[in-house]
Amino acid sequence: MHPESLLVGLILGIILTIAIYAARGRRPVNLNKPTRVPIGRYLGGFPLATSPEDSVDCLIDTSAFVFVSRFNKEFGRIPRTAVVDIFCEEKPQLLPRLTATKNITFPNLGVAKNRSLSGYCLVIDWQIGDVRNNAVFEFRGITARVTAHSVETILKSNCKASVPPLRFDERNCPFCREVIKKEALLCKHCRSRVTDPKPARFTLPV
């Protein structure tokens, strides 16, 4: 076989592989059941996960985005109702768009003299109470832009949970927005101490 034929075959194989991955990223996802979405490489943003993590998946359930490592270890969770914004950005333009950098180190983002500032990032901007956070994930390779926007579309379509109306004896935790009992002093979901609600005043009939 001629070297030219081998080269043409190799090029066609690469193009076909790229097309398959791009189409897979645009494949519709059944959003009526819990979904597992590959979300790239975690760079920072969660208080208890300060080091980068490769091959991260996002588990979408009825109330939250749950982020797990390749070994299915959970290292971050964002209530769907706490999401402020989800956006994609090239890394050189990323820093000005971040609203919170408390749990993000610049070396993790690749902002260092010995590392090139390249890549395409997905940012989940979320807030619980008065605390604002940005979770940053990175996509690499020639399909990075397409893949990042595909994940962005999936997450945006899930960012607001369909919450049933509260019962007469329920209220939302002011920190994580999960449902708790009205008389609760400690949230069973985020373990935050919540204020004691004022008792309702009833007027006895005369």
Image (tube, rainbow, N blue to C red):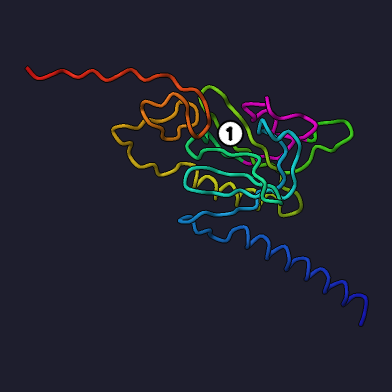
Eyeballing the image, is 201 above or below 126? above
In this picture, is 190 found above or below 75? Answer: above
96 inside magenta stretch:
yes
The secondary structure type at the circle numbered 1 is: strand
x and y percentages locating residue 135 in the rendered image: 64, 36
Q: Quadrant of residue 180?
A: top left
Q: Position of residue 51 (x, y in %)?
A: 76, 36
Name the kind of residue labelled 1 in the image.
Answer: Asp
Q: As displayed, is residue 185 above or below residue 9? A: above
Q: Is residue 7 left or right of residue 44?
A: right
Q: Tag 1: Cα neighbours inside 10 Å, few (<14), some, or many (≥20)?
A: many
The quarter of the rendered structure image containing the C terminus is top left
Residue at 75 percent across and 49 percent down: it is 140
| Residues drawn in magenta | 88-109
Tell me the residue that label 1 is attached to. 125
Q: Position of residue 5 (x, y in %)?
A: 87, 77
- Give the side of residue 169 with respect to residue 35, left or right: left
User: In the image, residue 66 lies at what x, y percent?
Assistant: 58, 44
Q: Residue furthest bottom?
A: 1
Towards the viewer: 61 or 139:
61
User: Is residue 143 depicted above or below 112 in this figure?
Assistant: below
Residue 97 is drawn in which quadrant? top right
Question: Does 30 lie within the magenta span?
Answer: no
